[in-house]
Image (cartoon, rainbow, N blue to C red):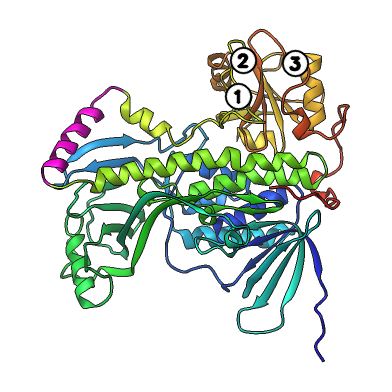
Amino acid sequence: MTTTPTPRRVPVVIVGAGPVGVTAALLLARQGVRSVLVERHRDVYPLPRAVAMDDEARRILQAAGVHEGFAALARPARGLRLLDARHRVMATFDRDTDQGHHGHPQTTLFDQPELERLLRRALAACGRCELREGLEVTDVRQAPGGPVRVTVRPVDGGEPEYLWAEAVLGCDGANSLTRRVIGAAWEDLRFEERWMVLDARTTLPVRSWGGVDQVCDPARAASFMRIARDRYRWEFRLREGEGVEGVTAERRARELVRPWVQASRSEDFEILKQVEYTFRARLVDRWRQGRVFLLGDAAHQTPPFIGQGLCAGLRDAHNLAWKLARVLAGDADEELLDTYQSERRPHARELIRLAVAMGWTMTGGRDRVAALRGAALRTLFRLPGFTRVAGERLGRPIPVGPLVPRRGPTRTRLVGVSCPQPRVTVEGRRALLDDVLGDGFALVTAVPPAPATRAVAVALGARVVHVGPIGALPGETVVDDDGGLTDWLRRGRAQAVLLRPDRVVLDAVPAAGTLGDTPAWTSLLTTASVPRPPTTADPHDRPATPPHRSSS
């Protein structure tokens, strides 16, 4: 006799327990939302994939609660060099190895399996996330106005099980089932190349300047970086007919790394991974259908030339988690979830195009065309400030939309940008700013807030943080930041900023003025017509939501 399995209700199901899926679970947990992660593999993939991230991605890991653990296994990098075919330096993009805009080194190199183990340890200690390994998702169905049904089955055989969720996050990679279920289609950004990725361990002397090398050689484009003390990563574009398997391929790999290390005859050069990847540039047209969302490689794929593949997925998680949590708690309108795609897709598209441009710089043209391109690039790189401005393109403001009004002559230029994260002093101790702001909204002010501004902060449950002691009320926080935040506010022509949980400026008090009486975002972020007093209960223990209506 066959019995129907008992359905199980959960707030959120996350399909895929890679770094993006686990980070999303941790961010949701800090907002009070429980989740179940379904992963078909029983352990982390043992070999490196992503090896670089920027300071914004590290800030997201800080928000997920794993900053200190990650710092112990990460290595700051000095930046990026572009080399010509003879390995002569064409340009250097220096990066701050101490503290960038987001409070961390601007470029960090790491071993992805170590990062994934760190994230899973945090997941196990969290208490609000359940990881279920050895299960594959076979179907995702969404009833109009009701929960989403996720069908799972053990990978080694067995009866199906049903999970009913208020929301489903598809973090299931380039071959995403979730993407197919919601009918999302790829937009092809016209880049596809075959590359060999080589990870090796050696104690031989290796030529490394402490950053990343990109070899701009149409005949054999390449990338190189030192990941750890004795770990290195090379990437080489494959020619027609070349493969990565067999004795010939290994001999070729040892010859290709010769500009950096004499490995051809040494046994002290262990190849950990030698695989072929097809680098693609594309993103989906639809990131959401109702309460089903796409994140990471399920939504976008980029060539690795500017190290933004994993970073983009972490940005997805950071942007969506607080919005979904607020809607699930009944504290925001369902239409807030539409801003996930409208805010993330333009930025992901721009970064993919930047990566494609870098790929063209490395591989485009031959002979005379390549020589002309090299000369033009050298001229461009000599322009004052070019390399600094090029690096700043990685962190663009949120585009104008429901949460970001158009900037007029009286509106501060800070709306839609990320707040910097300096180290501050609070009650005699030094801390990163985000650790003081907490996990929710925050009002950071250099002047005593007007009553209307305080009322908005109260309505959102925002923590009020004063840059200096003037005007602080009991229960509000005072920090000393050595002038950095004050200067940032002054340059942005603002007295105070209201920060979203992802540290983007939601609104600002101009140098002479107050917040508007009815900001444009009010209808999305609040469901009550009057301000609610700050809760004294643990925000992590808010109940799950009632049934919702479906939208796309």
Amino acid marked by disc 2: Arg
- Find out whether the residues at labels 2 and 1 contact each other: C-beta distance under 8 Å: yes
Amino acid marked by disc 1: Val
Numbered-mark total: 3
Pick whichever, 42 or 317, lies toward us: 317
In the displayed orientation, state which residue is furthest to the top.
512
Q: Between marks 1 and 3, how big is the CA–CA gap?
A: 18 Å
Q: Residue tagged by mark 3?
A: 449
For residue 339, what is the image quadrant?
Answer: top right
User: Residue at (28%, 70%) from the top-left corner?
Assistant: 244
Q: Which of marks 1 and 3 is nearer the N terminus?
A: 1
Q: Earlier in the sequence, mark 2 or mark 3?
A: 2
Q: Residue tagged by mark 2?
A: 411
On screen, residue 207 versus residue 33, left or right, reads left
Q: Residue tagged by mark 1?
A: 415
Q: Between marks 2 and 1, how big is the CA–CA gap?
A: 8 Å
Q: Give the range drawn in magenta.
A: 367-384
On screen, residue 284 versus residue 26, left or right, reads left
Pick whichever, 195 or 472, lies toward us: 195
Q: What element carries label 2?
A: loop
